[in-house]
Amino acid sequence: MNTWPITLDDIRGAHKMLSGVARVTPMEGSRHLTALIGSPVHLKCENLQRTGSFKLRGAYVRIAGLNPVERAAGVVAASAGNHAQGVALAAATLGVRSTVFMPVAAPLPKVAATRDYGAQVRLHGENFDATLAAALEYADTTGAVVIHPFDHQDVVAGQGTVGLEILEQCPEVRTILVGVGGGGLLAGIATAVKQLRPDVRVIGVQAAGAAAYPPSLRAGHPVTLDGFSTMADGIQVGRPGDIPFEIINKLADGVLTVSEDALARALLICLERCKLVVEPAGASTVAALLEHGDELEGPVVAVLSGGNVDPLLMQRVLRHGMVAAGRYLSLRLRITDRPGALASLLGALTRVDANVVDVAHVRTDPKLDLGEAEVDLHLETKGPEHCDAVVSELREAGYTILQQS
């Protein structure tokens, strides 16, 4: 007797259901990443899915499976962004009323997009737990059906359709990398792939600052993190889902963790070298290539799970990525306070071909001695070796560097 919560037939049925609703997203090769790890790398571009992420797949399958009474009661969800938009569009497509609770600090573009897709948005709570509690209370009061972002069989089956597409588009694949929050996407892909191609390794990726799966897998049951922090808000989940965990514990080939620096560098690579707008959670698989590429058998397919990134966050992350890649250098120096001193400093930077992005010149500060000034410099550089050359040039010219980052 099959006791699995999800079967291959469930996923195939979901794939037929999604025909004409969800896009079969493209698979793009990356010469840059291929050269970086020495094996072929392909990107499964779910950032180009409708609503900007894979979440539409599971939300649609879940809502489509409701009976007429449940549909009449409407649906409710809690989300900071991607799931919210997936539920909103899926419900509107099926003619079902939707209410989405979002944290009060949710990025404005995601709030606006969720409303545009047809949901009634309610901002509540400073964090996701408070937002979810409000959504559950609303469901109890109104009878609306809760559409969970990952912990339901239909949702996992919908996300598993990504796995079917990967095997169709890249039959030679040996390793699939999947970003992991609650685990719905990884569980769905693992179910589809392992039943069709058990030789293919399916590996999850989590941000090191929000990695609930490694300790949970060691313990053999879902473990709740005491706290978490990462720029990859799309996979910032404090506890694995019960249904995804059961599947991942049996079928997945492990879960890797990646640093914040790697996430920032990955986002920069996706934008610069792959010409793809990807959110930090979606770029987690590329971050795994940067930090664990030598451990992976190719060809590798990295799933880019989403592209809904707030422009302000994008600006901060790209700057962080440039710093991590050695292409952005911040310095604080002390110089003499005399005419021409700042021009001499800038001349020294010209000699080493460093591009000044921003400069702040402070002459009046209690910590400065008479005749001293302090300068904050933000420079665009060409890499770590160029950063070292800039610092060496300034020190040889007699400048005192107080701070470097």
Image (cartoon, helix red, strand yellow):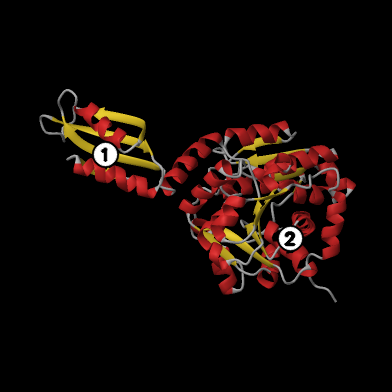
Which kind of residue does numbered mark 1 sit on?
Arg
Q: Is residue 208 left or right of residue 169?
A: left
Which kind of residue does numbered mark 2 sit on?
Gly
Q: Which circle's residue, 2 or 1, is located before the other in the chain?
A: 2
Q: Residue at x 24, y 41 (%)?
A: 394
Q: Residue at x 43, y 49 (%)?
A: 324
Q: Is residue 153 left or right of residue 337?
A: right
Mark seen at residue 27: none
65, 381: nearer the viewer: 381
The answer to whether the residue labelled 2 contacts the one labelled 1, judged by CB atoms less than 8 Å apart, is: no
Query: Where on the picture, by quarter, is residue 248?
Result: bottom right
Examine the rendered structure and indicate whether residue 40 appears above or below residue 323. Answer: below
Query: Where on the picture, by quarter, is residue 97?
Result: top right
What is the residue that sits farthest to the top in this orientation?
339
The answer, for residue 127, to whether it is visible in the render is no
Examine the rendered structure and indicate whether residue 386 appears above or below residue 250. Answer: above
Q: Which residue is mark 2?
A: 188
The spot of residue 329 in percent (x, y) is 36, 42
The spot of residue 237 in percent (x, y) is 58, 55
- Disc 1 is placed on an element classified as strand
Q: Which residue is mark 1?
A: 332
Dividing the image into 4 quarters, which one contains the N terminus?
A: bottom right
What is the residue that sits farthest to the front in this orientation?
351
Dividing the image into 4 quarters, which one contains the C terminus?
A: top left
The spot of residue 11 in percent (x, y) is 82, 59
Q: Nearer the viewer, mark 2 or mark 1?
A: 1
Q: Residue at x 65, y 41 (%)?
A: 101
Q: Residues within 10 Å of mark 1 (few under 14, many from 20)?
A: some
307, 386: nearer the viewer: 386
217, 29: nearer the viewer: 29
Q: Residue at x 78, y 42 (%)?
A: 90
Inter-mark Cα distance, 2 to 1: 50 Å
